[in-house]
Amino acid sequence: MTVLVAGFGPFVGVRQNPSGEVLPLLSREVSTVLLPVEYDRATLRLCQRIESEKPDIAILLGVAEGERALRLETVAKNLDDAPVPDNVGIVHVGVEAVPGAAPLYRSTLPLRRLERALRWAGFPVTQSADAGGYVCNHVFFTMRHFIEERGLATRSGLIHVPATREETGWTIRRLADAVNRCVATLDTRPSQT
């Protein structure tokens, strides 16, 4: 099984983005890509990697400031709606992520299984039907659209991670353990004995 995990770099108000900082700590078997917090370049970079690698699983990580639990996003909406500019100053308010595309795509990750595995391992986790209106949701939607349009078998979804601050109870190491737990849960290959 091949897994691609993508995270983001810093952006306005978030000088350290744990979704990107965690990537070097993930299992060596996982392919990773650091995305800029830019609507167009992030989408292009991730879709190019999916096209070239054709991973079985593509997990997009984003940060959710103020959260204390991992948020497994159930849907990506075809709506960019954030007054905050991306890192190159682009603001999208009330526009479709992909003009004329479906209104939403569902995550194709086994979210219930992931939630059970994370809870069993002691990680706080929840499911969410609102990935926001900023770059995370945009990239999540365009990634799902890209996969569907090309008929790829890649299962994909977005996980929002908490900020790594003392008050959240999360460190980069703990976050890496949680993401590695997700990857191990998704690995359905028979065990080698």
Image (tube, rainbow, N blue to C red):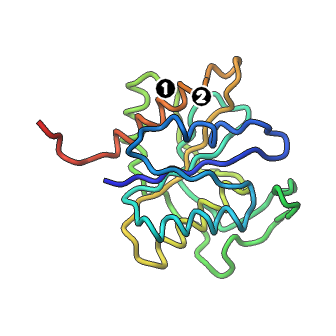
- Residue type for callout 1: Phe
Q: Where is residue 124 in the image (x, y as percent from the top left)?
A: 52, 27
Q: How far apart are marks 2 and 1 (CA)?
A: 13 Å
The residue positioned 43% from the left and 65% from the top of the image is 53
Q: Which of 116 and 12 is in front in this view?
A: 12
As displayed, is residue 17 above or below residue 73?
Answer: above
Q: Which mark is residue 123?
A: 1
Q: How crowded is mark 1: few (under 14 residues within 10 Å), some or many (20 or more)?
A: many
103 versus 132 height, above or below: below
Question: Can you give x and y, in whole percent of width and height, for residue 62 in the image?
Answer: 64, 46
Which is nearer the eye, 140 or 180? Answer: 180
Image-based side of 109 in relation to 127, left or right = left
Position of residue 135 relative to residue 144, above or below, is above
Q: Mark 2 points at which residue?
A: 172
> Within 10 Å of the Cα at label 2, are there few (<14), some (14-19), or many (20+) other Cα atoms?
some
Which residue is depicted at the point 61% across and 64% down? 45
What residue type is disc 2 on? Answer: Ile
Camera-side residue of 87 and 168: 87
The nearer-to-camera label among 2 and 1 is: 2
Against 69, residue 148 (above or below) is below
Q: Residue at x 46, y 69 (%)?
A: 52
Comes first in the chain, label 2 or label 1? 1
At mark 1, the secondary structure is loop
Quarter assignment of residue 173: top right
Secondary structure of residue under mark 2: helix
Which residue reaches farthest bottom?
A: 100
Q: Is 95 left or right of 154, judged from the image as shown?
A: right
Residue 160, position in %: x, y? 60, 42
